[in-house]
């Protein structure tokens, strides 16, 4: 029998997006508004060119503070799972049958934490943002992909990522199609988002190109220094990425509402274990072949 996990907390009728958006500046609810068309065009341009779009100051300061306080309460309760583990970009085990220089044998220590989605508070504003149909439709238009769905993944559908002093989130690929990031609290130093756009394709792992980046080649690496309240939409399945080491007393906290084109799929068991600390029954039951043949 499958384990029970917390469903979405809000019906669409209960979500008032003005609680987290300035609708004059970001009228994503109004399909006729020229400003909305500009936002969509801006995001599509960044995604087409770089596999990443960035909208500064997207979330209201009051909403960011509410999310910040929720994350701090959950951290104080011990809900941020520390993940001191050695991982490769694919979150797979070492394969001694490969050459030592192969990307699958490139391991780094990950020390960042996640507040898993099933631990969010019942009135979580992050859950409200994630459950908003208006947000789903806006993200789909920005991606120029549709339909998209909220993820069935119970642990990683909308978590907080937490990086304390001296934490590092190494190079990796995502198991899902794309992720929306909302920076809730900046690190005092470091914590830059680095990524390599489209370093692999649905039909080619491009191990030589991946390996070159892992061993220090920087000509294809892009750097995005997010600020509190910024929105980022990112295609992380094909673009390898990391977060540089953080410094300071204040943790870097980022919300990660995540959407997919296949609402049935979840993380593979090894991916759930590596990121979220455990695999549930659903991860084994839905451990199906992907349309692409890439390593998660």
Image (spheres, rainbow, N blue to C red):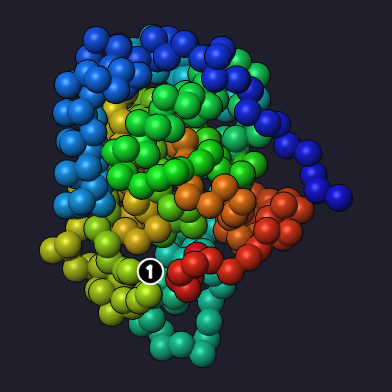
Image coordinates of residue 87 in percent, x first then y, are 49, 63
- Residue holding disc 1: 202
Residue reaching furthest right? 1
Q: Residue at x 66, y 34 (%)?
A: 118
Q: Is any part of residue 162 visible from this angle? A: no
Mark 1: give few (<14), some (14-19) or many (20+) Cα within 10 Å.
few
Q: Is any part of residue 128 visible from this angle? A: yes
Q: Does residue 198 lie above or below 125 as drawn?
A: below
Image coordinates of residue 274 in percent, x first then y, are 58, 56
Q: Does residue 181 lie above or below 66 as drawn?
A: below
Q: Residue at x 49, y 57 (%)?
A: 175
- From the viewer's perspective, is 198 left or right of 278? left
Image coordinates of residue 98 in percent, x first then y, are 46, 87
Q: Does residue 97 lie above or below 182 as drawn?
A: below
Residue reaching furthest left? 219
Mark 1, secondary structure of its residue: loop
Q: Which picture quadrant has residue 58?
A: top left
Residue reaching furthest front? 32
- Which residue is more in the foreground, 18 or 144? 144
- Which residue is more in the foreground, 202 or 279? 202
Image coordinates of residue 53 in percent, x first then y, are 24, 41
Q: Residue at x 51, y 41 (%)?
A: 149
Q: Residue at x 29, y 22 (%)?
A: 31
- From the viewer's perspective, is 1 left or right of 38? right
Q: Which picture quadrant has residue 181?
A: top left
- Which residue is more in the foreground, 177 or 93? 177
Q: Which picture quadrant has residue 166?
A: top left
Q: Does residue 48 lie above or below 38 as drawn?
A: below
Total residue callouts:
1
């Amino acid at each position: 029998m499958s384990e029970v996990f917390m469903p979405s907390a809000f019906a669409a009728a209960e979500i008032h997006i003005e609680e987290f958006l300035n609708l004059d500046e970001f009228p994503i609810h109004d399909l006729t508004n020229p400003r909305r068309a500009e936002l969509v065009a801006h995001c599509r341009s960044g995604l087409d060119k770089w596999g990443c779009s960035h909208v500064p100051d997207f979330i209201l300061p009051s909403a960011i503070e509410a999310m910040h306080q929720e994350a701090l309460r959950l951290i104080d309760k011990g809900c941020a799972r520390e993940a001191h583990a050695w991982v490769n970009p694919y979150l797979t085990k070492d394969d001694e049958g490969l050459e030592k220089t192969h990307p699958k044998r490139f391991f780094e220590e990950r020390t960042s934490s996640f507040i898993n989605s099933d631990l969010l508070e019942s009135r979580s504003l992050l859950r409200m943002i994630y459950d908003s149909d208006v947000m789903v439709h806006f993200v789909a238009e920005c991606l120029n992909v549709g339909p998209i769905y909220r993820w069935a993944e119970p642990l990683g559908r909308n978590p907080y990522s937490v990086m304390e002093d001296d934490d590092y989130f190494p190079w990796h690929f995502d198991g899902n199609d794309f992720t929306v990031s909302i920076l809730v609290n900046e690190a005092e130093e470091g914590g830059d988002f680095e990524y390599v756009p489209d370093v692999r394709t649905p039909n080619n792992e491009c191990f030589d190109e991946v390996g070159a980046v892992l061993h220090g080649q920087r000509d294809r690496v892009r750097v995005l220094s997010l600020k509190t309240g910024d929105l980022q939409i990112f295609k992380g399945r094909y673009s390898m990425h990391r977060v540089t080491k953080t410094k300071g007393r204040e943790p870097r906290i980022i919300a990660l509402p995540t959407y997919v084109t296949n609402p049935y799929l979840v993380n593979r068991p090894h991916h759930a274990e590596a990121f979220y600390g455990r695999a549930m029954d659903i991860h084994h039951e839905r451990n199906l072949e992907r349309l692409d043949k890439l390593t998660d």
